[in-house]
Amino acid sequence: MLPLHPDKIELWLAFCDEIADEGLLADYRRLLVEEERQKEARFHLAHDRHRYLITRALVRSVLSRYAAVAPQDWCFEEDAYGRPQIVNADPVARRITFNISHTRSLVVLGVTCERALGVDTEDFHTRQAELGIADHYFAADEVAQLRTTPPDLQQTRFFEYWTLKESYIKARGMGLSLPLAQFGFDLSRPRSVRIGFHAPLIDDPTRWIFGLWRARGDHYVAICAQRAAGRAAPQLSFTKIVPLRDAAPLHCEELRSSEFKGAPPPRA
């Protein structure tokens, strides 16, 4: 078992285009419960079925590294906002906090305990930034900063905002019931990230810590974690994994961070 500690946040990254072995994918499918197998079959596009299968296998196999629960035995229930919660009776399992994000080619799973956690990833090379979305849904100060960003940098800056905003609403666990325009990020200082709130949304900026990293050159990974009172800044690690097969430390370039610090990644 890997140690579970509130001062550690571990990120597990599975690159879907590197997982194609049919025997391995069949092993993944055997980990799923019937409801998950039926959901996989309902995806119309093959790449969506592929990503979903990897996502479920990643969650089930990685969580079993932290608690004495077999991958196929994990039980989840969605809360009022559709966020999955662990409902296994195992006391270690019930301490786990996890969050998932994915693009077409990357699935990211964040794991910690005893603190809220939100993770988001975006492929900023294959997706096109839509500034009209920012105009309608971002905070006014974010829109102003984005519009004054040089045109050749607007694509990446848009996705910096987007991933950070997604990580915050996921950490809050309330989805888009939190209006995106009622909180905003100040990215004006290099390598810095700060959040502010606008009425009627009420929150304390010092309650949260944020970070933004680049994975494999074309993906942003943003993290929002609840600050634990009286505790040190959490240690953060990245691991590249092929579920059920191998795992290795992964270097991700830190772009912005308010308080995270690096740590040795978990062992395979």
Image (cartoon, helix red, strand yellow):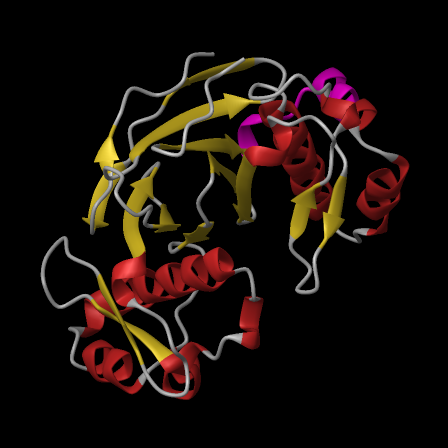
Between 28 and 43, which is closer to the camera in this rendering? 28
Q: Residue at x 26, y 78 (%)?
A: 142
Number of on-image labels: 0
Q: Nearer the viewer, residue 142 or 174?
A: 174
Q: Nearer the viewer, residue 123 or 163?
A: 163
Answer with left or right where residue 42 lies relative to residue 260: right
Say if the magenta span includes residue 233. no
Can residue 105 be spotted in the picture? no
Does 40 sit above or below residue 60?
A: below
Residue at the far front in the pictured view:
230
Is residue 127 toward the left or the right of residue 191 in the image? right
The answer to whether residue 220 is seen in the rendering is yes
Which residue is farthest left? 189
User: Which range of residues does the magenta coloring cover?
Assistant: 16-28
Residue 22 drawn in magenta: yes
Above or below, 51 against 127 in this view is above
Give coordinates of residue 49: x percent, y percent: 74, 43
At x 35%, y 76%, the residue is 183
Q: Main secondary structure of the magenta part?
A: helix
> Splitting the image into 4 quarters, where does residue 140 fall?
bottom left
Residue 266 appears at what percent x and percent y?
40, 18
User: Camera-side residue: 156 or 75?
Assistant: 75
Residue found 66% across the figure and 64% down from its top:
81
Along the horizontal axis of the image, is 180 left or right of 214? Answer: right
Q: What percent of the width, then of the height, locates residue 68?
A: 66, 16
Quadrant for the N terminus, please. top right
Q: Measuring 51% from the left and 33% from the top, which residue is drawn there?
A: 15
